[in-house]
Amino acid sequence: MTIHNKDIELLHFLHNELELSHKDIAIALKHREFDHAPLPMLLWQYGLVNLEQLEKILDWLYKNI
């Protein structure tokens, strides 16, 4: 799996701003390999973020990508 600079920035945002653990992020990344779904949706689908956090992620993506 290739991680791009924007992915790294998103991972930093998830950890630093939303205070997601490295373990939670790793779970979503692992599922992304199999599900081929966007990381924010996987985080929400697996209950790792709530709707408010999902909205913050989507806002961040809109502004930064």
Image (cartoon, rainbow, N blue to C red):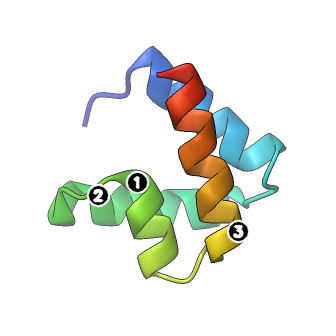
Please say whether residue 60 is visible from this viewpoint. yes
CA distance for labels 1 and 3: 16 Å
The amino acid type found where label 3 is placed reads Glu
Screen quadrant of the N terminus: top left
Q: Is residue 24 left or right of residue 32?
A: right
Residue topped by disc 2: 32
Residue linked to disc 1: 39
Q: Are marks 2 and 1 in contact (CB under 8 Å)?
A: yes
Q: Is residue 16 left or right of residue 28?
A: right
Q: Which residue is mark 3?
A: 52
Q: Nearer the viewer, mark 1 or mark 3?
A: 3
**Which tag, 2 or 1, sits closer to the chain's start?**
2
On the image, the x and y values in percent for residue 60 come to 62, 36
Q: Tell me the quarter of the picture where residue 13 sits.
A: top right
What's under tag 2, amino acid-wise? Arg
Q: Residue at x 62, y 74 (%)?
A: 51
Residue 9: image quadrant is top right
